[in-house]
Amino acid sequence: MEKEFNYMTGTQIIFLIVGAVTLIAALMVVTVRNLVHAALWLVATLFGVAIVYTLLNAGFLAVVQVVVYIGAIAILFIFAVMLTRRQAADTGAALNSNWWAGALMAVLTFAGLAYLLQTWSGFSKQSAAIPSGFDAIGQLGTALTSPQGYVLPFEVASVLLLAALVGAVYLAFNKK
Amino acid sequence: MIPLSWYLILAAGLFSIGLFGVLARRNAVAILLGVELMLNAVNINLVAFWRYGDISMMAGQVFAIIVFAVAAAEVAVGLALVISVYRRRNTVVAEDLDLLKW
C-alpha cells in the first residue's frame, strides 16, 4: 500500500484533457448569448463525448456519435436557430430571472449524484482487459438483430423515429 | 488505467450542466440544447457500465443506440414545434408562451 505512488498513464491524461474540454464546451453551450455559437459549442461537446466513447473501446458508437449527432442533430439546431432569428432574440438576456434557482438545482443534483456514487462499492472499479479476438461490432450487430437479443426494442425505436419524423413534417408544414 | 468513477463524475457534471441549461435559458432552442447535453451524459454512463461490467453483454451499447434514435426523434419534433410556434406567435422565448398559465 505504501508504494502506491504511480504516475498518470497516457490514457488518463487524454481523459482529463478531453473531459475538461467537454465540460467547458458544455458550460459555453448553456451560457453564451448567441445561439449559433451555442450550437457550435454543442458540436465541440459532442466531439468530446465521441472521444470518451473511443476511450471506452466503443468505436462504433463514436462513429455514430459523429455522424448522427454532429452531422445531423447539430446541423438541424443551426437551421432552427437561423429560421427563428429576430433582432430581439440576440439582444435580450440569455438566462431567465430564476437562473440562480436553476444553478442551485444543478449544483445540488451534481452533489447528490457524486455523494450517492461515492457510497457505492463498485465506484472505483477498474476495467477488465478485453479478451483477444473479441468482436464488439459483430456482437453488437447480433444483439440488435437476433430474436434472443434486442430486435423488438430496435424495431420499436425505428417506428418511433418514423412517427416522430412524420409528426415533425406535419407540425412544421406551412398550411398556406 | 481509468477507474469507472472518472466516467461517472464526467457524466454527472455534463448532466448537471444540461439541467442548468434547461432550467435557466429563455430561448426554446437553447432549452433543447440542454436536453441534448443530458441525453449525452446518460449515454456516457450506459457505455461506461458496458465496458466495466460483463463485456459480452451488449445491453449498454444497444440502449445507447436507442437513446440516439430517441434523441433524433426528440430534436425533430421539438424543433418543428419551435418553428411552428415562431410562425404563429413570432417569438421563441419560453416565458412568452404563457397561454396555459392561469
Image (cartoon, coloured by chain):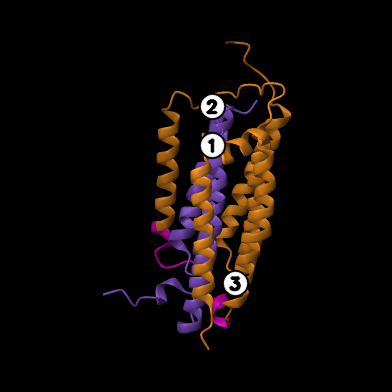
- Disc 1 designates what residue? B60
Chain at numbered mark 2: B
Amino acid at dot 3: Val
What is the quadrant of residue A52 in the picture?
A: top right
Q: Is mark 1 on a helix, strand or loop?
A: helix
Q: Percent from the top left, x then y, of residue B49?
A: 53, 32
Where is residue A105 drawn, in percent x and y?
A: 40, 52
User: How many C-alpha atoms fall within 10 Å of the one at disc 2: few (<14), some, or many (≥20)?
Assistant: some
Comparing labels 3 and 1, the label whose residue is closer to the camera: 1
Q: How many labels does the image show?
A: 3
Residue shown at 67% from the left, 44% from the top: A62
Q: Position of residue A57 (x, y in %)?
A: 67, 34
Answer with mark 2 or mark 1, whichever residue precedes in sequence.
Answer: 2
- Residue located 45% across and 37% down the image: A114
Q: Mark 3 lies on which chain?
A: A
- Kindly indicate whether the residues beneath marks 2 and 3 are on one polypeptide chain: no
Amino acid tagged 2 = Gly
Residue underneath mark 2: B53
Q: In which quarter of the image is residue B6?
A: top right
Q: What stretch is highlighted in magenta?
A: A87-101
Q: CA separation, marks 3 and 1?
A: 33 Å
Relative height, residue A105 to residue A168 (above, below): above
The amino acid beneath tag 1 is: Gly
Per the image, the residue denoted by label 3 is: A81
Q: Which residue lies furthest to the left in this view?
A: B102
